[in-house]
């Protein structure tokens, strides 16, 4: 069988998990051939735990230059995603990058240009798109079965983090080391799913509280009001300070609504359109007798290995990716818009002023409490390499 020769750059939490998933037997078309990390202790781990034929490199650039693999997974801190992606693409390697695609949107275009010029695949690790519940929600919304969206609300506060989490690395939850808080670390998947299922808003007014629940300099509590092109509105709430937290996505449409919560997708379906059948009817207080129905799905939720296998299949056979690289720009645009609105204390329209965002972020990085990023340890959502940022 023809297999994709894969390298993994970054051997922190996510990078090491990618290695183990590929080696678990769940990736029939992938051969793990090399890995890289700037930290010696992680290279020691790789030599001890990975098969003997897996080459261990001292840096991502060294792995890229070696020409041993056809594709790489990039699992390093946020700011390094674009740099390493461009380097790999220019060397003729296919790239699967961990989320977020970058810290700010102005970083993304050079990556997309490098992918286009090289003709190689650039994909993103948006593993929540493999969840059967969210796939079914998108299928229903795309089908028009419930009519146009009127309102959406996502409360995603089951990200609780204690202060010890933030104290585990000098780079963590800093503007200079990570580039953001709950919006950039915990929520990229939900922001991607929001725009994937509901569409990208055209206007955002957000309130992002920095260090509200923790001794950190970035946001740990966010509430955002959204407006969509068709007039629909939305609310997005995220926090790392709620215990117990909530994960509830509700979408109300002209012919009913969907609620995804606690591992179930429920649907309420009106017998006719609200706008055409009820709004102008003779009954001033219509109360249609409808009962919620649990929506059946295929039950599949392969997560990271599903994205990786689809990446390999796309390269080997031309089948679809789970998430193309350019789609990461939309999720990041939404994240940046929330930050920018909070900083300016006013609504912003999308696409945002990318230069203005970059300037304001740079000012925060210059006053960041981060003193030295060379002691980077691990990250729950993004592998780290110890590279100074």
Image (tube, rainbow, N blue to C red):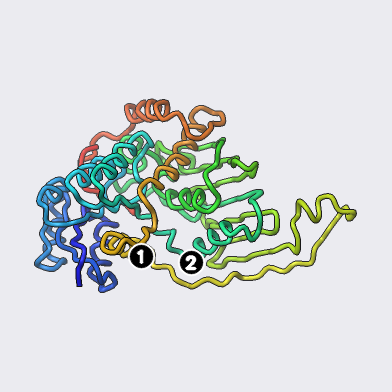
Query: Judging from the image, what secondary structure is the residue with disc 1 in?
Result: helix
Q: Residue furthest right?
A: 282
Residue drawn at x 65%, y 59% as measured from the top left? 146
Residue drawn at x 82%, y 61% as measured from the top left? 287
Query: Left or right of 364: which side holds 83?
Result: left
Q: Position of residue 112 (x, y in %)?
A: 32, 42
Residue 365 falls in image quadrant: top left
Within 10 Å of disc 2 (Cα), the crowding (few <14, some 14-19, many 20+) is some
Query: Left or right of 136: which side holds 267?
Result: right
Q: Position of residue 227 (x, y in %)?
A: 60, 40
Residue drawn at x 66%, y 54% as measured from the top left? 253
Q: Which mark is residue 306?
A: 1
Q: Is residue 264 visible?
A: yes
Query: Left or right of 264: which side holds 309?
Result: left
Within 10 Å of disc 1 (Cα), the crowding (few <14, some 14-19, many 20+) is many
Residue drawn at x 53%, y 56% as measured from the top left? 245
Query: Left or right of 159: which side holds 250?
Result: right
* Nearer-the-camera pick, 306 or 36: 306
Name the image quarter holding the C terminus.
top left
Q: Position of residue 156 (x, y in %)?
A: 52, 53
Q: Earlier in the sequence, mark 2 or mark 1?
A: 2
Q: Is residue 170 visible?
A: no
Name the image quarter holding the N terminus.
bottom left
Q: In this figure, which residue is indicated by the disc labeled 2? A: 132
* Nearer-the-camera pick, 132 or 75: 132
Query: Judging from the image, what secondary structure is the residue with disc 2 in?
Result: helix
Q: Separation of disc 2 and disc 1 at Cα?
A: 12 Å
Q: Which mark is residue 15?
A: none
Q: Is residue 346 above or below residue 172?
A: above
């Amino acid at each position: 069988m023809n297999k994709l020769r894969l390298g993994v750059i970054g051997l922190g939490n996510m990078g090491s998990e990618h290695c183990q998933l590929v080696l678990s037997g769940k990736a029939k078309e992938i051969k793990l051939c090399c890995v890289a990390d700037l930290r010696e202790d992680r290279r020691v781990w790789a030599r001890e735990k990975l098969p003997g034929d897996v080459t261990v490199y001292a840096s991502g650039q060294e792995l890229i230059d070696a020409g041993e693999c056809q594709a790489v997974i990039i699992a390093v801190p946020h700011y390094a995603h674009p740099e390493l992606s461009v380097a790999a693409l220019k060397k003729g390697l296919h790239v699967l990058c961990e989320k977020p695609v970058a810290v700010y949107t102005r970083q993304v275009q050079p990556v997309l240009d490098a992918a286009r010029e090289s003709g190689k695949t650039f994909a993103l690790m948006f593993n929540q798109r493999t969840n059967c519940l969210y796939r079914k929600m998108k299928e229903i919304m795309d089908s028009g079965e419930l009519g146009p969206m009127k309102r959406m609300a996502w409360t995603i506060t089951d990200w609780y983090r204690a202060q010890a989490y933030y104290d585990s690395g000098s780079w963590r939850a800093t503007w200079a080391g990570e580039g953001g808080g709950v919006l950039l670390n915990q929520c990229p998947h939900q922001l991607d799913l929001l725009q994937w299922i509901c569409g990208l808003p055209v206007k955002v007014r957000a309130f992002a509280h920095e260090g509200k629940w923790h001794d950190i300099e970035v946001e740990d509590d966010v509430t955002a009001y959204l407006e969509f092109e068709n007039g629909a509105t939305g609310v997005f709430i995220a926090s790392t300070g709620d215990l117990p937290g909530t994960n509830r996505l509700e979408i109300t449409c002209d012919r009913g609504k969907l609620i995804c919560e606690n591992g179930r997708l429920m649907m309420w379906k009106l017998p006719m359109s609200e706008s055409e059948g009820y709004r102008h009817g003779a009954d001033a207080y219509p109360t249609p007798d409808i009962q919620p129905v649990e929506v059946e799905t295929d039950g599949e939720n392969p997560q990271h290995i599903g994205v990786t296998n689809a990446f390999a299949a796309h390269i080997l056979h031309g089948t679809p990716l789970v998430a193309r690289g350019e789609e990461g720009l939309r999720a990041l645009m939404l994240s940046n818009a929330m930050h920018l609105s909070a900083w300016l204390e006013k609504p912003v329209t999308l696409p945002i002023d990318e230069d203005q965002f970059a300037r304001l972020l740079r000012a925060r990085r210059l006053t960041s409490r981060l003193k030295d990023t060379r002691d980077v340890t691990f990250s729950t959502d993004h592998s780290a390499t110890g590279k100074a940022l």
